[in-house]
Structures are given as structure tokens and as C-alpha cells.
Image: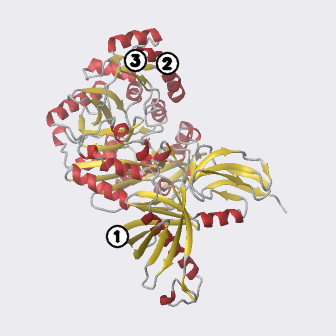
Amino acid sequence: MRKFNSILVANRGEIAVRVMRTAKSLGYRTVAVYSEADAGAPHVAMADEAVLIGPAPVGQSYLDMTRILKAAEETGAEAIHPGYGFLSENAEFARACEKAGLVFIGPTSEAIDLMGNKAAAKRRMIEAGVPCVPGYEDKDQSDEAFISASEKIGFPIMVKAAAGGGGRGMRLVHAAKDLPAALSSAKSEALNAFGSDELILEKAIIEPRHVELQVFADSHGNVIHLGERDCSVQRRHQKVVEEAPCPVMTEELRGKMGAAAIEAARSIGYRGAGTVEFLLDAAGNFYFLEMNTRLQVEHPVTELVTGLDLVALQLKIANDDPLGMTQEDVRLSGHAIEVRLYAEDPAQDFLPCTGRITNWIPAEGDDVRFDAGIVEGQEISPFYDPMIAKVIAYGESREVARHRLIEALKRTVLFGLTTNRGFLIDILAKEKFADGGATTAFIGEEFTEGDLADAVPDAPSMAMAAVLQYRIERDRTLANTVFVTEGLLDWSNGGALITHYAYQAGDEKVDVAVSPQRDGSYLVAAGEAELSVEVLSQGASTALIRVDGRRHHVQFAAPSDSLLEFAESGKALRFTNLIALAASAEAGPAGGRITAPMHGTIIEVFVSEGDQVEPGTRLAVLEAMKMQHDIIAEVPGVVQLVAAVKAAQVAVDALLFEIETAAE
């Protein structure tokens, strides 16, 4: 196998950053590829060289094999690391790399082909003696064949797309009468998602654990596993929380599952990093689910409990070196838990969110790790997966790791767009998760619609928000003042100042009045409540505030005069001062760059690029705070950019349209 000194990473975001971090530490030259939407992304700045490969849509950039191979040729890259996602499990891409004389840092194209098809993979695993779920994986795809097989398997049954994953083309069927409709819809979805409508049937294992084994194999015949990960906490078959080791694992069970995973890899002549996934039932029986022929998103938890760098092992194997370790050398120590931080809104059925990250300060702490590919000021676009970071904590015990992870999430400063951070904290705090009892049914069983609803601000949070908004406005004003005696701050000739705000709390508008006191505290009336607020310390994005004798550690950001973003214990709230917002709306935009006046959802877009508009032309409708707001053109001209996307969430000040104004 050819040796290499330079690596092109055919991916983006935290994936590319993660791969480059190890590659650069080992002395490799790194090459990034990026789309027009990612020109300012961290992975581009991190690489030794970067190549623009096309517009934002993945089909014209990150999934365009021709452009990626051309970038490798232009930069003299000798190897390509596909990361995970995109082209990482594309056998055609692996073959194209080999044909171009490039080292593909991954398994052979034959292994990718075989394990990429659930039916073929399962047939091979049955031949190899790996425990499999009873089912049907034959080539006869007629409804008659499926119906006949279902009678032998018994209900409930899982219908699955043979060529894909991620929950697409998957249906749970409880009764025979529902099978034909499930087959029809699953075939249609699978064909659209994966280009193949081949299906398999499997006996549904009710409320199992999802347990996977990390395997590594070199080209010298060595195959080992690095222990297991429990990935049972899932939403729509997408993993949300992963941990190592599995909370219910025993040495005996690990030995059996590990032997099965090694045999699965050995039976197909595997090379590189792979993950063999199993379903584990309450009785300790396990069944082969699938094999992912790449590194996994959740690989950091394995790194933390083994002390190994899995990307470094990938590079070692790709260089045709032996693993240099045996199964006996693998030692598991402590516990690690990872959560996936998404730009999505749990209250809106986890709708992906877009917007600009105004504040991003990851928490620091013992044994806490952030794998992220974001920076302050970065736009999160609708074109890519909404995962913006992974947060991982390690501990000598599972409970220590859990507490560290909760605190890291709470102390992280993140504003500008809606995320699932509060939801992640709630998962980790649930008694069933703390006890290690979570199965794949966990989220559905533990969370109601009410649990996922937007938090309604209470009087103390409104009081703190109003005081912070008041102090920010005051400081902005004082920055343009030559001299003010400290003792006269917040006072006028007529005595104490009273500043009014109007906040939305659920369906109600609440009037809040802030009155500074002589001792530096504030008297705040929030609706019917009256509270004493003291700001003990205030930084650029954090504050320690005492409300009626109780201390609160809070985070905040003020991206506009009308908005204060606020978080306490990881729970995010947005306080829009309706008084300032109304004044801002009345003033109207200043020119051809049109941004969102508040956080909300685009429900209609009326114009396209190239359209001629006049003052008063409706451009879009933004739904926010239970009301619909027309986005109106204030200047005549031609629409040059339409960034607004129907059904997408946008953050305050997010760019929606650009209009090239008509020449005067």
C-alpha cells in the first residue's frame, strides 16, 4: 500500500476539525474542501490548504466526487479521509480514490458494498454464525413473499430499507392488515432516500438496548474490538446520547458480543475502523443489526475509556502498518458520556433551526471535551445536518461523568439560535437515565409534549432580564457621555428613574417596571409580583444576580435593542421588549439588506432572485410569538439574494433578503 504525507478531508464542520486535529499532530499536511456557505468555517481556517468545491447544496459540493478528486489533484493530496457521513460509506467513491492513485482512509470498496446493504450483510452474518434477528432478507421483493414471511416471523415486525439507515424506509407493523401499506410507504421512502426500494423484514425486538462494538482490523490479519458503546437514547432512530461502557454490560456478555463483532469483521476481510451494531434484549440476548464501515460520531467516548486516538489508528492502518496491539492490550477505564448538541427546536417537533451564533463559549472543566466546528458569528445554514457540536464528559464512575456533563452543558454560553441543550440536560437528569435503565423507548416514555414545550418565563427571570436590559441600555448611553458621577447613576433631577418593558409570557403580555434604588439594587414590578434584584457581578455574557435573597448564575446576550437572550441552568429564554420592537418596526429597515426582526419561522416566501420589487412588496411572512409578521420591501430594486427558506426557523438579525436598489 502506498505511503502518504498529505490528507484531504472530504467533510466539513466538527468532523473535519476532529480528523485534522490528529492528522496535524502527527505531522501530516491537511487539505480542506468547502462550499460557498462554509467559507468562514473553522475547518477551512485550520487546514494547511483549502479548496472551494461549489455552492452550498451538498449535491453540488460535498457529495460531488469529481470536484473533491479534482481538489486532491490540484493540491497534491495523497490520501483522502472521508470522515463520517457524506461519502464515507460510498463504495463508488472509495473505488474512484483508488483509481486516481489516492489512499482511501477506510475499508475496501467491496466491504462497503457488502455491509451497505442490510439484506446482503445479514445473509453474510448468518453464514458467519453471528446472532441475527429472525427475519426475511431474500431477493424476492413481492408483497406475497413479505406477507408469507411475516406469518412465519410473527408480529410485531420491523420493515427496513436494505440500502440505508437513520430511520428512513423503516416501519413498525403490529398487525398483518397493516403490512401492505407499510411496505408501500417504506419502499417509496427508501427509493427517494437511497435510490433503492429493496426491503427486509425483522422480528421487532421491543424496547431493546442499542449496543455497538468498535472494531479495528489491519491488513496483516489482526482484528480487535475496543469495547462497546450504549446508544439507546434515540429520537426517530437517531442517536442523541451515547456512553461507554454499556451500563448493564458484564464481562461475560462483553466477551460474547466482542467475539461476534470480531467474527463479523473477519468474515468479510475488513480493514480499518468499523462499528458492529447489536440489539440487546432484557434477557441478555443480542442480535446483529448492521455494520457501519466508518468511524462513528460517538467515537470520543471510546477514546476516553481506552486512552486511544481512533483517528491515529485509522491513519496507521491506512499506511499499511500493523495495529501494534492485541485484544489483551485493550483496557477499559472509567466512564464517558456524549450528547449531540443540535440547532433544533424541541418545542416545534425538533424542527432544525438556522441563524447566526452570536455567543459561543464552551465550558471548561476537568475531563470535559467539546468536538465542535463552529465559531462566534458563524451562520448555521439550512443546507447541512443541524448538529453543531458534541459534548463529552469522562469520570471515574458513570455518575461522575453524568454530573460533569450536566454542569458543562449548563455553563456553556451559546446564543443566537435555538438548540436542544435544555432537552439534553433533562435527559441526563431523568431518574431512569441516572439508574442506567434507558432503552430505545426512553424518550417516548419519559417525555410528554408538555415537557418539550417552550418554557414560560416566571417573575424572577423576567425581573433579571429587565434589569440586564436596563443596564445594557444605560451603559450604551454612558459610553457616549463625557462624565457621570457614579453616585448619580440611574438617577435624575426628579428622583429615581422608572423604565418600562413589555414581555411575552406564554399567551400573556406582562408589563415590567425597573426602578433603581440608592443602594445599587433594583425594585422590579413584574405583573403582580414585586421583587428586589441585586447584580452582584456582570461580565460580557454572564452575571451573578440575587433576587429576593436567592442567587442566580445566568448567561445573557443582547443582539438588538429589543431582544435579550437569557439562560439559567441551561434553560434558554428569549425576552423581546415589545415596546422597543414596535418602535423598531415603525422605523423600518434602512436599505436593501433585510434581516429578521425577531426569532421565528418563515411560513411563506413570495419572491425569487431576480424579481423586481417596490416599496411595500411582501417578501415573506415570519411567524413569531404566536403572530404573523409581514416582511416588506422598503426600497425599490431587484432581489439579489433569497436566504429565507419556507418552514425554516430564523434567529433575530438573520439575513433574509438582499435587494439591489435602483439607481437614482
In front here: 159 or 384?
A: 159
Residue 529 location, quadrant:
bottom left
Asked whether the viewer can see residue 643, the reply is: no
Mark 1 or mark 3, earlier in chain: 3
Which residue lies under the disc numbered 1? 551
Q: How many angstroms separate mark 1 from mark 3 (CA)?
A: 56 Å
The percent position of residue 627, horizontal first and vertical second, equals: 62, 51
Residue 286 location, quadrant:
top left
The percent position of residue 124, horizontal first and vertical second, equals: 32, 20
In front here: 581 or 609?
A: 581
In front here: 600 or 532?
A: 532
What residue is at 40 percent from the left and 17 percent from the top? 175
Q: Nearer the viewer, mark 2 or mark 1?
A: 1
Label 3 sits on what residue type? Ala
What residue is at 53 percent from the left and 78 percent from the top? 475
Which residue lies under the disc numbered 3? 175
Label 2 sits on what residue type? Ala
Is 656 placed left or right of 525 in the picture? right
What residue is at 45 percent from the left and 8 percent from the top? 144
Q: Is residue 45 above or below residue 67?
A: below
Image marks 1 and 3: residues in contact by CB distance under 8 Å: no
Q: How many angstroms separate mark 2 from mark 3 (CA)?
A: 11 Å
Q: Secondary structure at mark 3?
A: loop
- Tag on residue 181? 2
Mark 2 or mark 3, earlier in chain: 3
The percent position of residue 280, horizontal first and vertical second, equals: 26, 30
Q: Secondary structure at mark 1?
A: strand
Q: Is residue 263 above or below residue 413?
A: above
Is 476 placed left or right of 316 in the picture? right
Mark 2 or mark 1, earlier in chain: 2
Image marks 2 and 1: residues in contact by CB distance under 8 Å: no
Give the quarter of the figure containing the N terminus.
top left
